[in-house]
Image (tube, coloured by chain):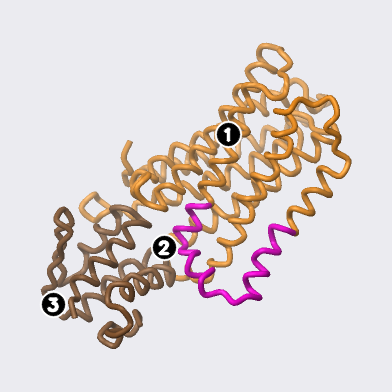
Amino acid sequence: MEYSKVIISIIEAQENIIGPVAIERATHVVGLAVDWTNKAVEIEGEPISVLTDLVGQYRELFGDISVEVCREAAMHSVGSGALDKLPALLR
Amino acid sequence: MKLSKNTQRNALIALGSLFFINLAWWLLIPVIWPGTEKGTGVYLYFAATYGLVTIVGGVAGLIASRHWGGLKSYLGKALFFLSLGLLLTEFGQLAFSYFTTFRDVELPYPSIADIGFFGAIPMYVLGSFYLLKTLNIKSVIKNAGTLKLIGLLLIPIALMVITYLVNFKEYSAEDQGSLVIFLDFADPIGHLIYLSFTLLALTRAQSLMGGMLRKGLIIILIGFLAQYLADMNFLYQELNETWVNGGYGDALYLLAYSIMALGLISFCSAHLLPKTEGAE
């Protein structure tokens, strides 16, 4: 499963809502390098933990609504077949 | 102008000062100038100045909008249109006061002031619409059962009936120009639309729990409710010919504008700045 694709989908969905703050928040995640000019991310740590931290960054702003948006973006990106490979809060 | 760590503090000081000075002034008029009739003298000066709170809220809101992506994001758009709505309202108030209080000219209806008053309504509709998008309302509607959807639809219908009973039961279009008739109906309908969006948005309050933007969003939604009540009171008083400038209706507007301004200022928090820009 391409976790970087899921992460890009999540950042894009959040960018639609909160603008550049979405990218800025993503840069706070340990183990995630973001190059948004090229719409590219690099996971340098454990993907599940990076994804969980990323969702946590957005949750700090809008609570469960942010989690909901992340979940929808992730599901849209991976489809229903690979849901078990996502962190629990995104399933 | 860019969001800085002092933006919120300065805006709060300005808003708080203007709110309390105006409120104290309005409350003390009967004490300091006993016998002054509402709609005359110092009451008119109060009516001309209290709207300054909207400038503070409007400017802070525009700064916040830019921080949150401006017209490229839902939240940025919501803050932008709400700020524009507040600023247009103030344009209407200043134009009205300039002609009626300072130039002693009686303005017709509609007049230049109504560009501001009426122009604010579509801005509020757009602002509340983008707030709904910010709150991911699409997902609620998609997952709502039939009963919940009927419930959500009943709210605007009930409000429409109330608006009709309060404002238009005895309305007569005789001798009215088509623009006046359009404005008389479009005005409450516009208010009804943003109120319905606001009530729908309030159903998301629980899901915002734990988010640091929750407070600001709830204050804005309360501001919408207060604005709706102030506007309905204005329409009611106007149709019953009991509206006076500087009366309690204007004090209601002072409160509504201040709540909305406070909500917009909440989005200027230094805690939301990137750490490299000196967040507190």
Q: Magenta stretch: residue B153 in it?
A: yes
The stretch of residues the image draws in magenta is B129-157
Q: Which mark is residue B212?
A: 2
Would you say B33 lies left or right of A56 here?
right
Identify the residue under disc 3. Answer: A45
Q: CA distance from mark 1 to mark 2?
A: 32 Å
In the displayed orientation, state which residue is furthest to the bottom.
A84
The chain holding disc 3 is A
Q: Secondary structure at mark 3?
A: loop
- Magenta: main secondary structure equals helix
Q: Magenta stretch: residue B275 in it?
A: no
Identify the residue under disc 1. Answer: B119
The residue that appears at 18% across and 59% down in the rendered structure is A39
Q: Nearer the viewer, residue B62 or B118?
A: B118
> What is the display colour for chain A?
brown
The residue that appears at 88% across and 40% down in the rendered structure is B170
Q: Amino acid at mark 2?
A: Met
Q: Nearer the viewer, residue B206 or A16?
A: A16
Residue B38 picture location, percent across and down: 80, 28
